[in-house]
Image (spheres, helix red, strand yellow):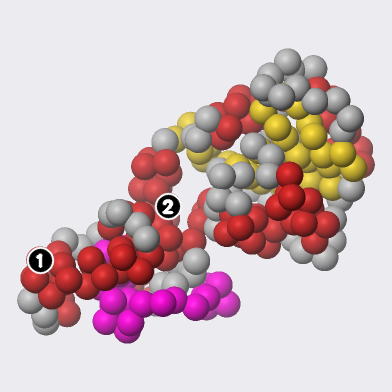
Amino acid sequence: MSSQDTCTPEGIRVVIVDDHPFFRQGILDVLTVETDIEVIAESDDGAEALELLGDIQPDVVLMDVNLPNLNGLQVTKQLKEQCPDVNVIILTAYDDEEQVYRAIRIGASAYFAKDVTPGQLLDTVRAVAEGYYVIEGRRMTPAQAEQWLLELYHRYGIKPEDATFSPLTNREMEVLEQIIEGLSNKEIAYRLGISHQTVKNHITSILSKMNLSDRTQAAIYALRHGWVQFTPERRES
């Protein structure tokens, strides 16, 4: 783990996390020639990187998946819970749709195989620093990324081991699951056998407990924190 001495205050502050010195140096060489980007630190260990990133909170992290002690996905998940404004780009040898889905679900802003071109990498660093996502080569707004995530949930779901504590009641979780399925309030009321007003009351309670403003935000939060369990019945519905 090391920090860089030079600093350009108005640049995009980047940290590189990768346990291969040669690859890390290659990324460094690409980034340091850009006047609007500064590499402020490097790390080759997941646990050390998490501590470092929490302290300096860069704009963008270039994160390998295979790291000692904590893997890159574990680091990303914990980092986004602690520092939600830090943007993570996953760089890995494993590039398939399900892996991309799982990375974006836990908070990454972009995902690339390590054969990404320098131009693609630079464009992506700038894009995620501005609040965009880059998924399957496409730049997306947060709303577009949320829609993509919801669509892929129906294909891949959430593994049982991903589940974490939820502050919602059982009935509120049932309502939230229907929201994730894309049902309207009226459809939720019909499926659960409750009144339309009761559904509205549950949604108000859900948003209040989660400190969120709309249904889509609640659905994305639940997906990213593993609150919703995936079943074959849901896949077929």
Residue name at image x 73 percent, y 15 percent: 35
Q: Is residue 135 highlighted in magenta?
A: no
The kind of residue tagged 1 is Lys
Q: Quadrant of residue 74?
A: bottom right
Helix, strand or loop at label 2? It is helix
Residue name at image x 55 percent, y 72 percent: 162
Q: Is residue 221 left or right of residue 7?
A: left
Residue name at image x 89 percent, y 30 percent: 5
Q: How crowded is mark 1: few (under 14 residues within 10 Å), some or many (20 or more)?
A: some
Which residue is at the front of the view, 49 or 100?
49
Q: In this view, does 41 lie to the left or right of 128?
A: right
Residue, disc 1:
186
Helix, strand or loop at label 1? It is helix
Q: In this view, does 108 lie above or below 205?
A: above
Residue 233 seen in render: no
Relative image position of residue 33 (x, y in whole percent): 80, 17
Q: Which of marks 1 and 2 is nearer the N terminus?
A: 2
Relative image position of residue 221 (x, y in whole percent): 43, 60
Residue stretch rendered in magenta on the structure: 159-180
Residue, disc 2:
149
State the predominant SS element of the stretch in magenta: helix
Q: In this view, does 217 lie above or below 88?
A: below
Residue 115 seen in render: yes
Q: Is residue 163 highlighted in magenta?
A: yes
Q: How far apart are marks 1 and 2 (CA)?
A: 24 Å
